[in-house]
Image (cartoon, rainbow, N blue to C red):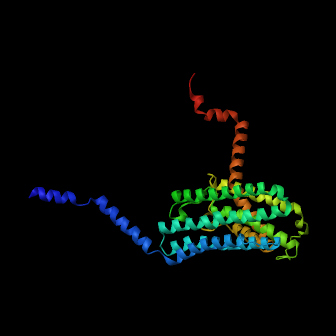
Amino acid sequence: MTSTNDNATDDRPSKAERREKRAARRRKRMVASISILPSLLTLSNGLLGFAAIAVATRHEIAFSTALSNQALAVWLLVGAMFCDMLDGRVARMTHVTSDFGGQLDSMCDIISFGVAPAMVMLRTAVLTMHETIGVEVHRTLERAIWCCAATYVACAVVRLASFNVEHEQDESAHMDFKGLPSPGAAAGLLSMVLLFVHLRNKSGGGWMANSLLKADWFAGQWLLAVVAILLPVAAVIMGLLMVSRFPYAHLVNQYVRGKKPVGYLVKVILAVLAVVVMPLVTLTIATQIFVFSAPAKAILAKVRKRGAAEEYPHEEALDDPASDIVE
């Protein structure tokens, strides 16, 4: 009788097994009952990215119309960025954060901040190249531009996969990112495209022709050649920065949350005025400063450290553990 009871006791699942089964049931319920509003915002992010790809790849014969399509695609991706900013905050405010939401967000980010910016860059660079370079050489350069776009997409995918592994659920727990965030890279690349389209259309009397920036000379062929080369190079650089380990500031946590000194308010007002006066120029400069701020700080810190070592070599020798070895 005792042996029968012992066998029945052995057949019972252990505490760890019961805990694992309860966790599995919770995960199933979380997937089955996803939060509607954050998920809709996240899906809107991905769908706007898909719409941007469709608009950017639309076939147009006129060069100006094709460039206007690229500008429209950029604005669709700006909308995707706003959705990406809101979905996580709405989920945290309503206390419905989940692993499902994080994975869905990364999937949509691959479309909106990985594939779509690369496609807009590819189309803009190829269009400008067709306007400046002969048919006999443009095929090779077109393949090179495609390789640059593919590099950007690959780096964005790796960046988002590593972020899923490393990030914490509580966004306020970290003040910086390791590597350039994919929305920041997309903003840096797309702002260049939007500024170029604006200058080209403005020189022809197009939209925003009343800008304070007088740019009639931007209609020259030299600008097309520069854009055809600069955009693919920038895409490769920003792609590599995404998979780098440079620390990038979390803009919301560092510059928006918490109390700030009075002088900080003055800086914000000046920045807003600059955006009002020359919006595209200001936004392009701001995004480029953010993109290249981390590597610039790292290079400057290394130069300062090397300069200090050359100026005070005896202090470096004292700090060297090898100097403590008795010969």
The outermost residue toward the top is 327
- For this rendering, which residue is in front, 264 or 46? 46
- For this rendering, which residue is in front, 307 or 183? 183
Identify the residue at horizontal 90%, vertical 69% (top origin).
216
Q: Position of residue 314 (x, y in %)?
A: 68, 32
Q: Please, is residue 58 above or below residue 242 in the view?
A: below
Picture quadrant of residue 311 = top right
Q: Position of residue 194 (x, y in %)?
A: 76, 69
Q: Position of residue 284 (x, y in %)?
A: 76, 65
Identify the residue at horizontal 30%, vertical 60% (top origin).
17
Q: Please, is residue 325 above or below residue 192 in the view?
A: above
- For this rendering, which residue is in front, 305 or 297? 297
Quarter of the image with the C terminus in it: top right
Q: Is residue 270 left or right of residue 206?
A: left
- For this rendering, which residue is in front, 180 or 318? 180
Q: Is residue 256 left or right of residue 131?
A: left
The outermost residue toward the front is 136
Identify the residue at horizontal 68%, vertical 49% (top origin).
298
Identify the residue at horizontal 16%, vertical 57% (top origin).
7
- Is residue 128 visible in this depiction of the protein? yes
Q: Please, is residue 49 above or below residue 315 in the view?
A: below
Picture quadrant of residue 175 = bottom right
- Is residue 273 visible in this depiction of the protein? no
Quarter of the image with the N terminus in it: bottom left
Q: Position of residue 178 (x, y in %)?
A: 60, 55
